[in-house]
Amino acid sequence: MTKLFWQSLLAVPAALGAAVAVSGSAIAADAATTQVSDFDQDAVQLAQITSVSELTDVLPSDWAFQALQSLVENYGCIQGYPDRTFRGQRSMTRFEFAAGLNSCLDVIATLIAQSGINPEDLATIRRLQEEFQAELATLRGRVDALEAETATLRAQQFSTTTKLVGQADFNVVTPIDIVTGEAATSVAARARLNFDSSFTGNDRLRIRLQSGNGNAINGLGGLANAGNSGPNYNVGIDDFYYQFPVGSRLTVTASARGLAGDDWVTSTIVPFDGPSVADAGGPQFYDAGGGGTNGAGVGLSFALTDSLIFDAGYTAGGQGAFDPSVGIFAATTQSYIAQLSFLSDGFLDAGIAYLHNDRSIDFQGGAAGGTDTFAGLLNLDFGGFFVAGHGAYTSFNGGNDFSWTAGVGFNNFLAEGAQLGVYGGQLPQLATTSNNPFIVEGYYEIPFNQFLTITPAVIYGDLNTAAADDEIGLWGAIRATFRF
């Protein structure tokens, strides 16, 4: 076979391969963001080029540079835009594909006319077609199916900028040792729908709808994933905020509702926060004090280094946050938080925090005045297991309080992604007439798949009230979490 003939055969897969690779690269880039490219269907007069150096947006460091150079300089069948750009990061329209293919076919026709084709070459081509007929048919079917699926997704897409994420938690709690007010098995459930929108790829507007009913182990902080919006599961807006970067290290968050306390910090450090069934697994000094998540606020997160993060936030709740006659800075409930965290990929995570609330409440709902809280958090990761905890000192009108938790956990215990943990501690109690409750929880979080996680737990609590006969309780609980 002549050299020119084989060059003509090689030009087709090379051109198509480059076109598909560039198109695939652009599609993958689009998929990483929440926006969809706006294809320009207007007629474009492409410009023939003779050297890849004529394309102003193609650099030798680009991964497809050599393929483009070969197609341009050896076959002359790649065209650029009139402004001498190739635009390799955008998706290719069918018009542009047809124009490029036509250019390559013109080259092939010229090469064939110059060299001619002998019967042996034609026989070889037919044999190859028959040999790979099944593979070509399969590939054609896959392409047709992909085009049909893409068309369906575009027609039925929820939004080009918004992603819908849901979570449903179902808790069953049984008192093993009777506690006053909680003598029977009960159910607590919560459902959340997050509408996360992004307009630049780096920002996020979140609107969260939430509904729930029921709770348990009241007096010990309740359950972590439960919410009581009434017996009819009334739906309300739980989170409403916009988060955006300023430069490469600063992130600003403006909130109309839902953010207070630990919502402003990058991490609460202790790994019990999240997997635990009882809310006490998340350090409760963040919540104690009545800062009010129904208010408006603003926060910032500044990465001093890759591991050192400074977070700060302000929340105005209660009367006045949305009242123009009072205003945000004179709201009846205000809270401030600042935390410095050291977050590594290795052995040590640690943080120090300061939190001020201008009106505090104890777990029985009694007013107790303003508070100032100073806290330290620590997590030591030994690989297969971790040791973690926190301590918090709070001063308030008429007294002071010390709370803490400490525990140990085992990651990937008996199953990949599972976590076995045991922690205990003294919870905050910010009324001078009360003592600190004490809690111990053992839990085992088991992820069955990416959609379902089951967490059984045993919870022991000492309410530390005046009634000696009913102040100690023991509960068995199981939580099912669905994510979609």
Image (tube, grey):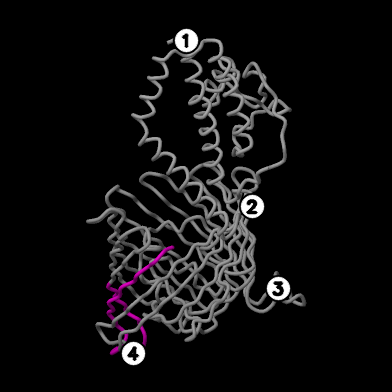
Q: Which residue is mark 1?
A: 3
Q: Quadrant of the C terminus?
A: bottom left
Amino acid type of the residue that numbered disc 1 sits on in the rendered structure:
Lys
Q: Which residue is mark 2?
A: 199
Quick one: label 1 or label 2, which is nearer the N terminus? 1
Q: Quadrant of residue 60?
A: top right
Image x and y of residue 202, in percent: 59, 49
Q: Are marks 2 and 3 in contact (CB under 8 Å)?
A: no
Amino acid type of the residue that numbered disc 3 sits on in the rendered structure:
Ala
- Residue at 62%, 19% (x, y): give it: 52
Amino acid type of the residue that numbered disc 2 sits on in the rendered structure:
Phe
Measure how far apart labels 4 and 2 are at the Cα level. 52 Å
Q: Secondary structure at mark 2?
A: loop
Q: Quadrant of residue 317?
A: bottom right
* Foreground residue among 9 and 480: 9
State left or right for residue 78 relative to residue 352.
Answer: right
Q: Which residue is mark 3?
A: 330
Residue furthest right in the image: 325
Look at the picture and state if 51 lies above or below 473.
above
Quick one: label 3 or label 1, which is nearer the N terminus? 1
Q: Which residue is mark 4?
A: 180
In the rendered image, residue 461 lying in the magenta stretch gets the answer yes
Magenta residues (range): 458-484
* Foreground residue among 149 and 454: 149
Q: Quadrant of residue 465?
A: bottom left
Quick one: label 4 or label 2, which is nearer the N terminus? 4
Quick one: label 2 or label 3, which is nearer the N terminus? 2
